[in-house]
Image (cartoon, helix red, strand yellow):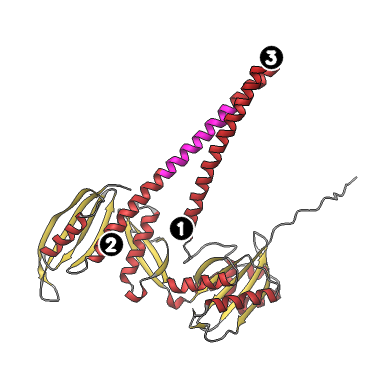
Amino acid sequence: MRWTSWLPRSRQPRLCVLGFDVGPEFCSLVVLTGSPTHPDTVCCAERLSLPEAWVVQGEVLQSFELGHWLQAYLEAGDYQPEAVYVGLDDACISHHTVTLAEGLSEDDVAFQLLAEVQSVMPECAADISIDFGLDTEPAPAGEQRYWVQAAPRARVDALQRVARAANLKVQVVEPRHDAARRTQLSETLAQLPQVSAALAWQCDEAFGLALRAWRDEGVNFLPYRAASKHLLRRAWVLGVAVCAMGGAFLAAGFALVMSSAAESKHWQMGDVVASTQAYDAAQKNHAQAKAAQQRRAEQARWLKARQDLQSQSLQWSRVLSQAAHGVWVASVKQQGTRWTVQGEALSATHAQQLVAQLTALDIWAQAPALPQLQITSAVSTTGLPVWQFRIEADLKVGV
């Protein structure tokens, strides 16, 4: 005999996301829904007719007006996306390959990659957002090659303002080309109803952006790495607080147990065994809480060392960038605490002035020295002799 349960079945939660493509010729959007594992319905897909002053050649000029219009559009269609994935015009994105020393922390890698890309960008485009990853091509021993993509920070900020004005949470800002390629390689279109697939093909970039919610891989010009670290720090603080509260409750509970045991005049064997088990459990929980707190303390010390090293990198990087008159820096290497700079100068005095500026920084375990300073046999294009130099020093904090 079969029994039919009268209890309501739990519904599987569904996702609803918006893919918003800002192209050089037109803007488009796709609202896509589905289960947590795969999308199954294209709610709408449309190329938008917007006032010309709002978006010009893929650049958003009126962020708040566009955001309020987008919010009204979604409310009119009764669409309730949880997040928005935005496409950026590929014409404003530059591609770079940068080689750094191995063994650098993630913060140092991000800082040095940003500095390297900014050094080759025009001065008017120095304020940029980047994303990077490891290059699969082999690199020389002791070095690591990275691919880097850069976009103007102003354009990324404008897209974020659009999302905030529309009361949406922006998850990704990525190149339109990557989104279109995701659509072409995806098997989702073949699994969708024919009507939904036809709608999606009309706005392939916006559809690929919405697919990012189910396939989170690729470039993202938002500062997601910093956001992840912020969440880790918050989790660490919460863990310390929980451990502290747990220890306090544990101590109070143990004190109550011992007080109650002291007032009892006639102990039975069963009570003795139960009290012993409770004490052993309390000791075990206390040891686990103490071990967790020690791990949090080690993580805090590790993070402090990384922040100190990044602070040192910021200081010597500013000196090198400000000492450009008469000096050209060819390479900067940092292996452990050993720090080396190689370059050329118009005169020995220029190189010595750079050493003096670096020595003034309070970051050295061993002050910068100038073991190599020699004039080259070749002559520069200005007709002046060129001095080659090498500066070596030891930092206070190593990797």
Residue 289 is inside the magenta segment: yes
Q: Nearer the viewer, mark 2 or mark 3?
A: 3
Identify the residue at image location x=52%, y=71%: 161
Identify the element where label 3 is drawn: loop
Identify the element where label 1 is drawn: helix
Point out the tag, 1 or 2, that comes first from the N-terminus: 1
Identify the residue at image location x=59%, y=31%: 250
Identify the residue at image location x=53%, y=82%: 54
Identify the element where label 2 is drawn: helix
- Residue 280, numbered label: none
The amino acid at mark 2 is Arg
Is there any visible trace of residue 122 in the rendered image? no
Provide residue 245's location: percent of width, then percent of height: 56, 38
- Residue 318, numbered label: 2
The amino acid at mark 1 is Ala
Q: Which residue is mark 1?
A: 226
Q: Dot 2: few (<14), some (14–19), or many (≥20) neighbours within 10 Å?
A: few
In-front residue for pair 284/67: 67
Q: Image check: 398 left or right of 298? A: left
Labels 2 & 3 near each other (Cβ < 8 A): no
Point out the tag, 2 or 3, that comes first from the N-terminus: 3
- Quadrant in the picture for residue 248: top right
Q: Which residue is mark 3?
A: 267
Point out the tag, 1 or 3, that comes first from the N-terminus: 1
In-front residue for pair 42/137: 42
Residue 342 is inside the magenta segment: no
